Image (cartoon, helix red, strand yellow):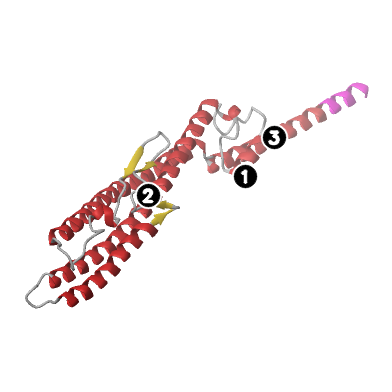
Amino acid sequence: MSPIGGINQGGYQPLYGKVSSGKALQNAADGAAELAISEKMKSQTGGLEQGSRNVSSGIDAIKIQDSALGEVTDYLQRIKELALAASNSFTVTDSDKAIYQKEIDQLKEGIAGVANITTYNEKNLLDGSTGDLNITTDGNGGAAKIAGANSTLEALGLKDFDVTKDFDLKDIDKALEKVSSMRSDSGATQNSLEHLYNINQTSAYNVTASESRLEDLDIEKAVGNLDKQRLLDTISVMMQKKREEDEEDKATRLFN
């Protein structure tokens, strides 16, 4: 049986529902194999679309993380400037170093604050408590990972950094390298997730298009069949009426 139903299989009445809905497959009787394939395609499309939403959320989290790490980089750059100034012992007094350290302490508080408040959906992104974030990317269980980041003062090795005491400028450079490495990892992961998102979107579009070709009704053909069936029904009624009239004429001649 064709997906839109044969003319001699129930007349034209079943076609009305299909034409109004635009769907050729309304139940298993319209094509059991086609319906099963269509449902499988719908499931695949649903998995791809949910995977895209998951990936999109991951990209949002990375953007938040990277923006916050950019703030940490700015704090560290300023700390380095102040530390360089404080290291010039020929022109800087102890009281000058104390002033520098006061600003450095404020900057360190800023770094600690960024690490504590940077979150996505109640998950901390920069204090080392969340660890790696796993993302399901499609309906087949595909997965991607966002590496955990830690920009706390302890992780950066600057908790006790103090220019009024013995200090090493290399400690700041190491902290900058750590932040740069975290941002590099985030950038690579974001690129990978964006690639996965595009693949999911393209795949979902193509699967949906295939499903539509299988499930959607050929409206022009269906309407043509309706018109054809109406014509056949009209002819059938006319022939039945003609037979009845012939029978009446025959009976009249016999009795006369």
Residue type pointed to by label 1? Ser
Up-down: is 236 above or below 55? above
Mark 2 = which residue?
58
Q: Nearer the viewer, mark 1 or mark 2?
A: 2
Residue plotted at (51% across, 37% down): 215
Q: Give the magenta-colored segment's residue range.
A: 247-256
At mark 2, the secondary structure is helix
Q: Residues within 10 Å of mark 2 (few under 14, many from 20)?
A: many
Quadrant in which residue 252 is drawn: top right
Total tally of numbered discs in the picture? 3
Instruction: Calculate the distance from the C-alpha at mark 3 to the C-alpha at mark 2.
Output: 61 Å
Mark 3 = which residue?
233
Q: Residues within 10 Å of mark 1 (few under 14, many from 20)?
A: few
* Image spot of residue 157 (x, y percent): 22, 55
Viewer-proximal residue, 42 or 218? Answer: 42
At mark 3, the secondary structure is helix
Residue plotted at (36% across, 36% down): 142
